[in-house]
Image (cartoon, helix red, strand yellow):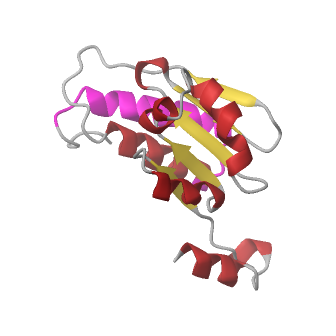
Amino acid sequence: MLQRIEQYNATQPLQQKVRVSVEIEKPREELFQLFGYGEVVFVSKDVAKHLGFRSAGEALKGLYSRVKKGATLICAWAEEGADALGPDGQLLHSDAFPPPRVVDTLGAGDTFNASVIFSLSKGNSMQEALRFGCQVAGKKCGLQGFDGIV
């Protein structure tokens, strides 16, 4: 599917290209080929730790060579927030926004990813998108399930 999108995009003007985001969530070697496909690539803390990295920033610097030219690599690190590294080489960071009481963390990572993508789709900067992703993921952790997240 991703290869078909690449073929399609090769024939389209910039405004009509499909933007792709991918997540490498599980530490399985066969998934690592996905690094090269997204304009926005999310790598999980689990994968980063599996590969020997001890922080989001360290992981981004160590893994950035795997993404395609012009891509942004993002790594959330739970209670430490999230970092992003883009083609300009600037490492961005957002602190976490923990709720007063953690109730349910299931789906917090997906909530973070979706919130970052949503924010970027609205034209926000990567710094704003990281912050928004951390805010919404933090709110989700204070809720059982997803009711009331928005």
Residue drawn at point x = 48 percent, y = 18 percent: 80
Q: Which residues are magenta?
A: 121-144
The answer to if 54 sits in the magenta stretch is no
Q: Is residue 122 visible?
A: no
116 to 33, vertically: above or below: above
Q: Is residue 34 left or right of residue 89?
A: left
Please tell me in which quadrant of the rendered image residue 57 appears.
Answer: top right
| Residue 69 placement (x, y as % from top left) | 78, 55
Q: Quadrant of the C terminus?
A: top left
Q: Position of residue 114 (x, y in %)?
A: 44, 49
Looking at the image, residue 50 lies above or below residue 30? above
At 53% from the left and 19% from the top, the residue drawn is 95
Which is nearer the eye, 108 or 148?
A: 108
Image position of 5 (left or right of 25): right
- Near-viewer residue (66 or 109): 66
Q: Residue drawn 55% across and 30% down?
A: 131
Q: Residue at x 52, y 42 (%)?
A: 43
x and y, in percent, of residue 39 in the image: 66, 57
Numbered label tally: 0
